[in-house]
Image: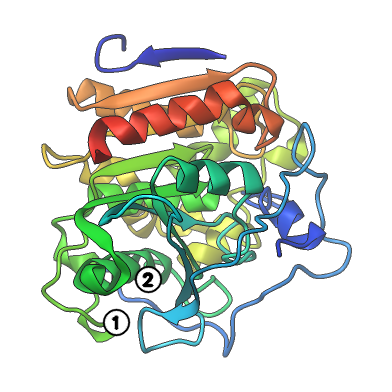
Amino acid sequence: MSTFKLSQISKMSVLSLVLLVLLSVTGCGSTPTATASAPAAVAPAGAMPALPQGGAPVAFSVEPNYKDLVYAPVSATQKMDLYIPTTGAGPFPLVINIHGGGFKFGDKGMLSETTGKALLNAGYAVASIDYRLSGEAIFPAAVQDAKAAVRFLRANAAQYNLNPEKIAVFGQSAGGNIAAMVGVTGNISDYDDASLGNAGVSSAVQAVINQYGPTDFLQMDAQAKAQGCSASDQTHNDASSFESAYIGAAIQTVPEQVKKSNPITYISKDTPPFLIQKGDQDCTVPVESTKMLADALSAANLDATYTSLAGAGHGGSQFETDENIALMISFLDKYMK
């Protein structure tokens, strides 16, 4: 595993575990548009990719202190599980987990045993959220939901013994893109939908961990080709791709809308610190698709750390080694305590 500072250098089912890598099987003005009556909770038969390289993480065994907590009133999807540390007096800093699944699949149960317990043991409360998937509402609904969850938890921090000034977001794959969008849009009202509740409460966060999330959907096929990935990893431009389903049209036909889903678009002096991690063998989301966000943050002289995990693909055990978990906790401690 190589790590460098860019500002200085340029009960989860087997199905849900598989969904962690579903950013791309066929591929990986912001008003959400409903495209179906309900979100897809599971993948269709025969659509499963291989498990993450190194095997799937173990499901989180801890029972939440608050299960299926509703954070917004618009959709039955808008709920979360909230875990509070068992030691310490609080108020506790908070990490919000945003699951992966190609914007189309997955749920809040996609929180691993290793990561979840490490956060709780380090004194962090953890909220794992559901959000509207692309089968229910297209972009920017997922981002608006994640920001609504931030506002809800900040507005109700005293009730749950949370520190409202210390909130981080953590996402993997599609969740990494959403987490990055939450991080860079703290002061952009376009993504704070008042109908989702707690209008006027800030949705800004103090830190972001983005593991192997995509950045600019329009470049992914070219990046995969340049990396030497197979033809099956070069289908993000297809009208049937997960990215196109998320945006609501074949991505190459709506470049301005795709630009709005790219976190680089919103980088500013107010952007919080980022930890960005990537497997150097990832072809599901090309390596450059994730790294380009780290490079853009560095170019803006912002606080960003990029970590390349040798031999790792799109997820896998390399992300849950003692060394990497310690790196994540150290990053959070620096900005959240």
- Quarter of the picture containing the C terminus is top left
Left or right: residue 26 compared with residue 140:
right
Does 125 appear above or below 43?
above
Does 55 appear above or below 16?
above
Left or right: residue 225 compared with residue 269:
right
Residue drawn 62% across the image and 63% down it: 109
Quadrant of the image occupied by residue 293: top left
Amino acid found under the numbered disc labelled 2: Asp
Residue drawn 56% across the image and 21% down it: 323
- Residue 74 is situated, as x and y percent measured from the top left of the image, at 38, 88
Instruction: Give residue 2's mark.
Output: none
- Quarter of the picture containing the N terminus is top right
Residue drawn 76% across the image and 33% down it: 53
Viewer-nearest residue: 146 or 335 = 335
Viewer-nearest residue: 55 or 220 = 55
Residue drawn 31% across the image and 33% down it: 333
Query: What secondary structure is found at the residue carrying circle 1?
Result: helix
Contact (CB < 8 A) between labels 1 and 2? Answer: yes
Q: CA distance from mark 1 to mark 2?
A: 8 Å
Query: What secondary structure is found at the residue carrying circle 2?
Result: helix
Quadrant of the image occupied by residue 146: bottom left
Left or right: residue 301 compared with residue 251:
left
Q: On the image, numbered disc 2 is attached to which residue?
A: 145
Left or right: residue 301 compared with residue 130:
left
Instruction: Judge the density around disc 1: few (<14), some (14-19), many (≥20) Cα neighbours within 10 Å.
Output: many
Q: On the image, numbered disc 1 is attached to which residue?
A: 196
Q: Earlier in the sequence, mark 1 or mark 2?
A: 2
Viewer-nearest residue: 206 or 118 = 118
- Residue 266 is situated, as x and y percent measured from the top left of the image, at 22, 46
Amino acid found under the numbered disc labelled 1: Leu
- Residue 158 is situated, as x and y percent measured from the top left of the image, at 22, 70
Does 212 appear above or below 63?
above
